[in-house]
Image (cartoon, rainbow, N blue to C red):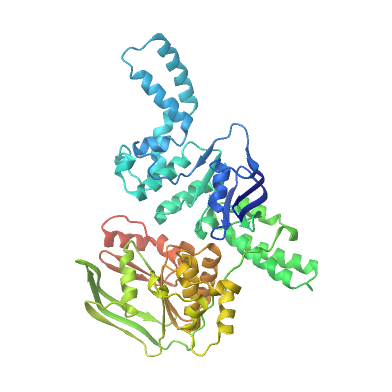
């Protein structure tokens, strides 16, 4: 068990935590959520002892070992991959190296023999004989083959180092596991392996992640950092979101009697319990949810931006036709003889490891780049809205946010624009900030506001979830689910893709794969797996 008692931490006038009290118990997985800058990673560092709080203490049960996903990719450059993983259990690694050192001596003394005997006993007790095998299983699950185990960390790519450090944290069955963004740089197959691992892990897991699919799959509880406090909720991220929205709705309607509120809560829990039965941790999580009372459901004070795309006119029958489109950049054929017909009602997710091809296609379709060969034709009733991956060009003038958005609205007064910006969380003086000092997330919210005001009936999004916090991702996700027009997009967010897209198009080295189906169905379909083998010439996991 881990207990945070009366934790407070401030940096100057910024208060991150004030009198936080929370317990993390074995057998549960806790997802730490909060707005950007709320202190999620900082709280993990307080739990691990890396940062000292201003007040309070972290209490860990006796004889419990804590493992932390390290963020320094260069700390183990001089060690082999296999040794780096085993170093996750420091005491075992120290015993192993001392034992090896004694046996390597040429003048082996009687004292060495006695020490070696003690080390042999301790080595066996700590699981030393299985250490290399267990480390290899972790590495294999994360996509690192046996032939790489003896390579030094300094000789491998950064995305491999990330996986090795994750294996290091998981090694040796730690009692407490702290993970900060563990799915970063992992492909879908490795993420699914990690989800399975954590779902079967019987000790305490505390994780920070922006991956909602991951949080929904592994978490039994959500710890919400909000206004310097941490509120604990039973259930995964989706349950926290829906329950907090239900509680907020009930708070607004003061005329509702308690019995009516309880009935609404019971109906909600019953519905969610049925849905959650698909998750790997369904049994334990379902039992926890069914024990909830009306007093356990609390509204969150977290603010969600308002995202809703309403087209000014409906799409016609003809949307987009692409014929024999090709584009070469720096001697590389990025798009090769692409033929595609986009129909009314399509919400197309473009997937595959060739991320550049998706961006190039979007740039061509929006007129920002010319193809080398082929043509494309938009329907006469189609109007375009574009969210580019790189929005730097949109924010080069020293304008306030209000002035910036006003450029895209005809005959709209400042009051209307300020009101609209307020729904995008730019209230009061926030709407007067200069565009030159906006954060990545703030710029994304500005571009979303622009798209909403333009009223296009066909939207193109190039990685829109980058830089956004969970609240903004959730709002954008819901907005695109409800959007009645056509959507072409790509994203690294699994849940975003699966809940929005009704058609999947994958770029492969040998043409595209085009199927009308949900993303989860696409990645699990045996026929698609066989087709991908043909297209790639080997087994390759689907990339977002």
Q: Where does the image place residue 32, in percent across and percent down from the top left? A: 57, 53
510 or 51: nearer the viewer: 51
Image-based side of 152 in relation to 163, left or right: left
* Image quadrant in which the C terminus is located: bottom left
Q: Residue at x 40, y 26 (%)?
A: 97
428 or 447: nearer the viewer: 428
206 or 270: nearer the viewer: 206
Q: Where does the image place residue 266, in percent across and percent down from the top left? A: 71, 63
378 or 178: nearer the viewer: 178
Q: Residue at x 42, y 28 (%)?
A: 129
As displayed, is residue 133 above or below residue 242?
A: above
As displayed, is residue 303 above or below residue 24?
A: below
Considering every residue shown, the one lying at the far top of the view is 110
Q: Residue at x 63, y 52 (%)?
A: 17
* Image quadrant in which the N terminus is located: top right
Q: Where does the image place residue 186, in percent across and percent down from the top left? A: 40, 53
**Residue 498 in sight:** no
């Amino acid at each position: 068990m881990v207990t945070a008692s009366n934790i407070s931490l401030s940096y100057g006038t910024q208060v991150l935590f004030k009198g936080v009290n929370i317990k993390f118990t074995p057998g549960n997985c806790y997802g730490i959520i909060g707005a950007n800058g709320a202190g999620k990673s900082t709280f993990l560092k307080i739990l691990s002892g890396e940062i000292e709080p201003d007040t309070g203490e972290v209490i860990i049960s006796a004889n419990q070992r804590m493992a932390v996903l390290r963020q320094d990719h260069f700390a183990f450059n001089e060690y082999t991959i296999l040794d780096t993983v085993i170093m996750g259990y420091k005491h075992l690694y120290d015993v192993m190296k001392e034992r090896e050192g004694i046996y390597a001596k040429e003048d082996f003394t009687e004292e060495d023999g006695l020490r070696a005997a003690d080390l042999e006993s301790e080595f066996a007790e700590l699981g030393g004989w299985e250490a290399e095998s267990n480390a290899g299983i972790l590495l294999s699950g994360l996509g690192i083959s046996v032939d790489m185990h003896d390579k030094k960390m300094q000789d491998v790519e950064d995305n491999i180092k990330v996986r090795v450090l994750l294996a290091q944290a998981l090694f040796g069955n730690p009692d407490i596991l702290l993970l900060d963004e563990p799915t970063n740089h992992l492909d879908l197959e490795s993420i699914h392996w990690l989800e399975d691992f954590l779902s079967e892990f019987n000790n305490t897991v505390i994780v920070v992640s922006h991956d909602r699919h991951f949080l929904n799959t592994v978490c039994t509880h959500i710890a919400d950092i909000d206004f310097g406090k941490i509120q604990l909720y039973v259930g995964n991220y989706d349950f926290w979101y829906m329950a907090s929205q239900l509680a907020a709705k009930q708070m607004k309607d003061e005329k509702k009697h308690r019995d009516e509120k309880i009935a609404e809560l019971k109906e909600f829990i019953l519905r969610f319990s049925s849905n959650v039965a698909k998750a790997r941790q369904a049994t334990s999580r379902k039992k926890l949810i069914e024990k909830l009372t009306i007093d356990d459901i609390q509204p969150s004070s977290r603010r969600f931006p308002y995202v809703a795309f309403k087209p000014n006119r409906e799409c016609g029958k003809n949307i987009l036709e692409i014929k024999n489109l090709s584009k070469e950049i720096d001697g590389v054929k990025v798009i090769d003889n692409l033929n595609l017909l986009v129909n009314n009602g399509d919400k197309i997710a473009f997937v595959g490891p060739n991320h550049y091809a998706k961006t190039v296609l979007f740039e061509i379709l929006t007129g920002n780049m010319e193809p080398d060969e082929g043509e494309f034709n938009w329907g006469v009733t189609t109007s375009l809205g574009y969210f580019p991956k790189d929005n730097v060009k949109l924010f080069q003038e020293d304008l306030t946010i209000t002035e910036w958005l006003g450029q895209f609205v005809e005959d709209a007064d400042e009051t209307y624009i300020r009101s609209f910006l307020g729904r995008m969380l730019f209230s009061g003086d926030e709407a007067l900030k200069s565009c030159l000092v906006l954060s990545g997330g703030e710029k994304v919210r500005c571009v979303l506001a622009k798209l909403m005001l333009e009223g296009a009936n066909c939207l193109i999004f190039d990685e829109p979830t980058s830089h956004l916090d969970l609240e903004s991702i959730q709002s954008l996700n819901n907005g695109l689910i409800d959007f009645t027009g056509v959507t072409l997009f790509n994203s690294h967010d699994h849940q975003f893709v699966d809940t929005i897209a009704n058609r999947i198009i994958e770029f492969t080295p040998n043409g595209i794969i085009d199927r009308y189906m949900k993303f989860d169905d696409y990645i699990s379909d045996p026929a698609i797996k066989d087709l991908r083998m043909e297209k790639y010439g080997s087994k390759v996991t689907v990339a977002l």
